[in-house]
Amino acid sequence: MDPNPAFSRLALIGVGYIGGSAALAARRAGLVGRVVGYDVDPQAGPLALARAVVDEMADSAEAAAAGASLVLLAAPVQSLAGLVRRIAGRLAPTATVIDVGSVKHPVVLEADAALSSGRFVGCHPLAGAEHVGVGAADPEIFAGRACFLCPSERTSPEATRMATLFWQGLGCQVASIEPALHDRLMAAVSHLPHVAAFALAASLTDALPLIESNTLPGRPTTSLRDTIRIAASSPQVWRDILLANREHLLPLVRELEQRVSTISAAMASGDAAALEAALALGQACRQRLVK
């Protein structure tokens, strides 16, 4: 262990897949000294201790945050504002508070209102997979990945510097983006794809007996597997994300509905030209999005 780590005590509030991965990566990089965790799920603690994700588990978010030089909020998006309010009175004056949420603007507004010191930095590492729980924590997931920092006008330069130090230490490429712009972007590149994947998987409910009886167990076709991969993600986590960012996401969902309706109408009428045009537009967009 580095005798003089950048962060002497890390409070990990939300001991799950992303938070656990970040703690493991920070340990390996020598960024943190002691790691104190807290999670509403009592089953998370023993596994986190066994995997050396944390050194100890606190019995409350407030106790975990007390004396921490860095607080990492890795809890569901809808709970973040309440957590910031809860820990505000227990924070050291120089503590930096960061999160990993996929929605930033409402979280940053609430955190700024709760923390007068400007020590909160909204963060979003674009890392990880559809895994759930601290048992899947993997310190490798951040290497070479992007991490958005979303400071507000109230965020102190020192807090931004410490957040940058942390994520770069985990191997991320850090970029700053305005919180509301971040949410508009994520609605298009992350949240809409999750809506589509969940809906596609659910649309096959009635076809499951046919699929399961005529394919290898657990081995769907490549096209189906690839397009529904992210539907393995936590429904609870994504419920919160979709609701928190619905202002930007709903217009895109309605556009998706319209595109599916166009394809459906062309198929129903046997209009080959209209069907090909709809498919060609999708192909052209895909070619621009994926180089």
Image: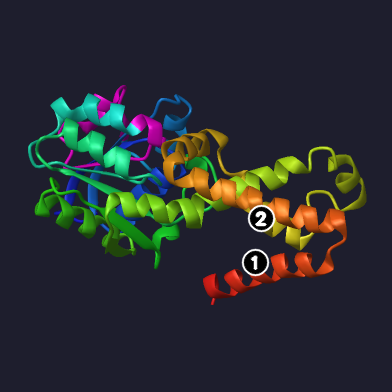
**Residue sitting at 12 percent across and 42 percent down?**
118
Q: Which label belongs to residue 282? A: 1
Amino acid bearing label 1? Gly
Compute the Cα span from label 2 to label 1: 9 Å
Q: Nearer the viewer, residue 268 or 230?
A: 268
Do we see residue 175 in this rendering? yes
Q: Give the labeled residue for mark 2.
A: 259
**Residue sitting at 29 percent across and 63 percent down?**
174
- Whether tag 2 and tag 1 are in contact, CB under 8 A, the answer is yes
Q: Quadrant of residue 75?
A: top left
Amino acid bearing label 2? Arg
Question: Residue 67, relative to residue 105: is it above or below?
Answer: above
**Residue sitting at 15 percent across and 57 percent down?**
161
In the rendered image, residue 224, in percent from the top left (x then y), is placed at: 74, 56
In the rendered image, residue 290, in percent from the top left (x then y), is placed at: 55, 72
Q: Quadrant of residue 266?
A: bottom right
